[in-house]
Amino acid sequence: MLLIDGKKISTDIKDELKVRVEELKSKGIEITLAVIQVGNDPASSVYVGNKKKACAYIGINSLAYELEESTTQEELLELIAKLNADSKVNGILVQLPLPSHINEKSIINAIDPMKDVDGFHPVSVGNLSIGQPGFLSCTPAGIVQLLKRSGVEIAGKECVVIGRSNIVGKPISLLMLRENATVTIAHSKTKDLKEVAKRADILIVAVGKPMFINSEYVKEGAVVIDVGIHRKEDGKLCGDVDFEDVKEHVSAITPVPGGVGPMTIAMLMKNCVDSIEIAEANNA
Ligand code: GUN
């Protein structure tokens, strides 16, 4: 059984990006990411801190906007408009969730698609679905990298994705299709989920329920990617997959923590670096 090491793979990607950023700097090109946080949700503060640290490691400039919880939607839209117009800013990231008085969709839609490094804008999702260059949402892009860099062949394989969220389930399904897998999307209304899941050579689980998937859902020798992260009562972290129950039956699996999690920030950094080429491709 291969334990897919997201920590090592994400570090490799960040080190490769560092080299690309140095090359761009030698041509006089700097990359700047604007990170906006509204309010001070503790989990968001940790994520934002990690994003700033990753920028510093790779050599990307980061501009931090830490706004009061009481910030209005209009004020946030004004800041986004200013950053959209600023040619020195390559990427804009608004940390989610936003306070309930702000409409998330309006904010995502206001970001210039050429600066949408989260890959959440409808233009980015549309580009992904028709195979045009554009920003890929970070967690799905990270999953493909985990598979490829662990030597898992995707083309022609049966891939079952459990979960259909806009952030993970839908985009990972499109990406696996682009990689020539045969893709099934299962969800809470799927009948005979165990039977459907057991078809998978590659099973991607993004249901948001702790230890939901046990060995009854897994074909012998399958590759299992666990997108979930939850804190158990004993304080330890677990995923959507019951790791201990499943591990003897798989050929490869991601641990939680240390699997998919570290990849999200690495791929955000990749989107920031790719922003130069994506802008060029769209201006061509
Ligand atoms: N909140 C949790 N995950 C994410 C993410 O990937 N991007 C943003 N902007 N907010 C998040």
Image: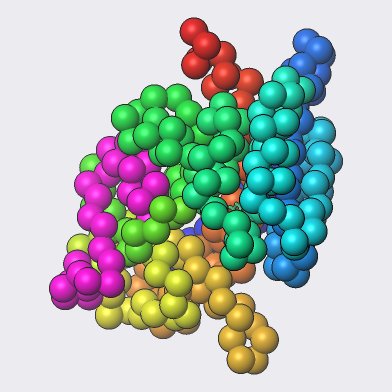
Q: Is residue 62 above or below residue 98?
A: above
Residue 193 covered by magenta stretch: yes
Question: What residue is drawn where x is 46% and y is 65%?
Answer: 226
In the image, is 45 to the left or to the right of 134? Answer: right
In the image, is 236 to the left or to the right of 55? Answer: left
Residue 165 covered by magenta stretch: no
In the image, is 201 to the left or to the right of 29? Answer: left
For ligand 1, which image quadrant applies? bottom right
In the image, is 253 to the left or to the right of 161? Answer: right
**Which x, y percent locates residue 150?**
49, 48
Q: 158 or 45, which lies in front?
A: 45
Q: Is residue 10 above or below residue 101?
A: above
Question: What residue is drawn where x is 25% and y is 50%?
Answer: 183
**Which x, y percent locates residue 173?**
33, 49
Task: Place residue 177 in its image quadrant.
Answer: top left
The boundaries of the magenta stretch are 169-196
Q: Quadrant of the N terminus?
A: bottom left
